[in-house]
Image (cartoon, rainbow, N blue to C red):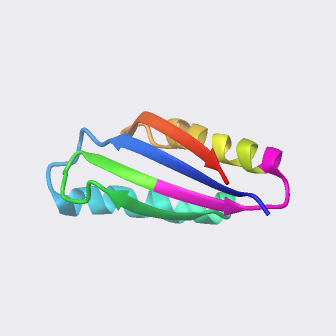
Amino acid sequence: MPVGLLLLYLHLPDCNSLKEKRSAIKPILARLHRDYNVSAAELARQDAWRYAELGCALVSNETAYIQTALQQVARSIESNWPNVELVDQHIDIY
């Protein structure tokens, strides 16, 4: 049973406080969960106003499906949130 992990490193240039950051990240996490059925959470850099590290996990019976689905998640960040810059992404499959 393969498990996929996607790490997303985001830059949020419009956020000037932790409250603004939280209000920007919360809808992203909810939409990723709703649209792609992944578990998503903010993992690190929680004290930085303009940077976020998100993690998404997906379990499936096919490695190819996991790879494709997690790539779609990363592309959706770039296309659906113009005020969020995707700095880097990393996919691991275990």
On screen, 37 above or below 51? below
Q: Residue at x 21, y 48 (%)?
A: 15
On screen, 59 above or below 67? below
Instruction: Residue at the far right: name it.
Output: 61
Within the image, what quadrant is residue 10 found in? top left
> Is the N terminus in the top left, top right, bottom left or bottom right quadrant?
bottom right
Within the image, what quadrant is residue 23 found in? bottom left
Q: Residue at x 29, y 42 (%)?
A: 12
Where does the image place residue 32, in percent across and percent down from the top left? 57, 58
> Is the C terminus in the top left, top right, bottom left or bottom right quadrant?
bottom right
As rendered, which of 17 and 92 lies closer to the eye? 92
Q: Residue at x 25, y 38 (%)?
A: 13
Residue 63, magenta (yes or no): yes
User: Seen in the image, is 75 located left or right of residue 10?
Assistant: right
User: Seen in the image, is 53 located left or right of residue 56?
Assistant: left
Residue 56, magenta (yes or no): yes
User: Seen in the image, is 49 located left or right of residue 23?
Assistant: left
Q: Which residues are magenta?
A: 55-65
Instruction: Residue at the far front: name it.
Output: 94
Where does the image place residue 84, in percent across and percent down from the top left? 38, 40
How many marks on residues? 0
Within the image, what quadrant is residue 86 found in? top left
